[in-house]
Image (cartoon, rainbow, N blue to C red):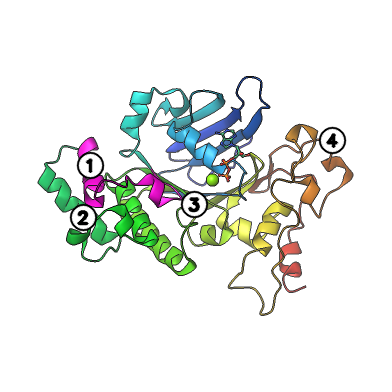
Amino acid sequence: MTRLPSARRDQEPLLAVRDLSVTFGLKGQRTVAAVDEVSFDIYPGQHVGLVGESGSGKSVTSLAIMGLLPDRGVRIGGEARYDGRNLLTSSGKEMSRLRGRDIAMVFQDPMTSLNPVVPVGLQVSEVIRRHEQASKREARARAADLLQRVGIPDPVRRLKEYPHQLSGGMRQRVLIAIALACGPKLLIADEPTTALDVTIQAQVLEVLKELVADTDAALLMITPDLGIVAGLCDEVNVMYSGRIVESATRERLFASPRHPYTNGLLHSIPRLDSRRGAQLTPIPGSPTQTIPWTEGCAFAPRCRNRIETCVGEAPALEADGDRLLRCFNPADRGQDSQEVGA
Ligand code: ADP
Ligand code: MG
């Protein structure tokens, strides 16, 4: 298995995911390979992006790492090494001790993640008390402090309110407060702002960014939006149909995307540095338009760079200079800058 030469070779990765595979299929049903031999590292304090359209396997990757996939009808292979242990084979008890304290998660939908019948303050202080020795009073004071830090005005009053009394943006701030309450070493944020209005999205992302920086937590940012990754992540893994298709530092990826899928994602978002009047070009087709990796490159049906080899044989993920790439006919290094405004 190929890995990128890491700039942080003097350190051990905080989380090392190796050949993670997740297959769904109850007896008698068609099996779905949702995640296929996915590998990446996250170093202490590093911000890593996992990017891809809906259905590419991002959430399943994070749920597998967190030990949150159902027991029945799921086959998990590979390793997710954290602090000397493989999370994929750790007991439920061990995982629930780690969750919240060492590794925390923020999900897309704050309404289903929060308990609707418990005041938000209590939900924050409960997490503190579950993982640390703190009196009710101490935990409440810290909860108020946390709400303040995530930008909730009048936090002492807000502590007593129920989730439905808060706006979507405020609820997502509460979730961020809960996630960062015990100073986790790793935060996994799975599309934390997708459900919010654009202006609120930017505010919540800013809060997340500040808190992650303040606490020195590493971040796995899961998003379909390369624009979010651009302002946040040091390294980026692009996923398509369960596999990583390109992996590079942010600088390399944005300066010269090589996988036609990455290139497509990049040209479908507005960029501050593009020429005025430059056209946004969405990727043709839909993410469901794939072929199984066993029959070729899954992206081939939508790919502008498709050549004969792409159907019939699947490209391997290989080192390409200082990045990893899974493609028989990648974009030219110079193609990106020529295409913008063409
Ligand atoms: P993403 O988060 O990138 O949008 P997911 O990780 O949620 O995508 O899903 C990846 C694939 O796995 C999809 O094809 C989805 O239908 C499938 N999948 C996810 N959860 C289950 C499940 N519980 N049972 C069967 N298939 C699932
Ligand atoms: Mg998802």
Residue at figure coordinates x 89%, y 43% from the top left: 308
The three-letter code of the residue at mark 3 reads Glu
Contact (CB < 8 A) between labels 1 and 2? no
Magenta region:
105-131
The quarter in which the N terminus is drawn is top right
171, above or below 59, in the image: below
Q: Earlier in the sequence, mark 1 or mark 4?
A: 1
Residue 59: image location, x then y, percent? 52, 42
Residue hosting label 3: 191
| Residue 159, label in figure | 2
Q: Given contact means CB atoms under 8 Å apart, are the residues at marks 2 and 3 in contact?
A: no
Q: Which residue is mark 1?
A: 126
Q: Position of residue 203 (x, y in %)?
A: 40, 66
Residue drawn at point x = 57 percent, y = 36 percent: 39
User: Quick check: 264 left or right of 190?
Assistant: right
The amino acid on which the numbered mark 1 sits, given as a three-letter code, is: Glu
Q: Residues within 10 Å of mark 2 (few under 14, many from 20)?
A: many
Q: Earlier in the sequence, mark 2 or mark 4?
A: 2
> In what element is the residue under mark 3?
loop
| First-in-chain label (1 vs 2) | 1
Indicate the amino acid at tag 2.
Answer: Leu
Q: Is residue 108 left or right of residue 159?
A: right
Task: Give the number of the mark in front: 2 or 3.
Answer: 2
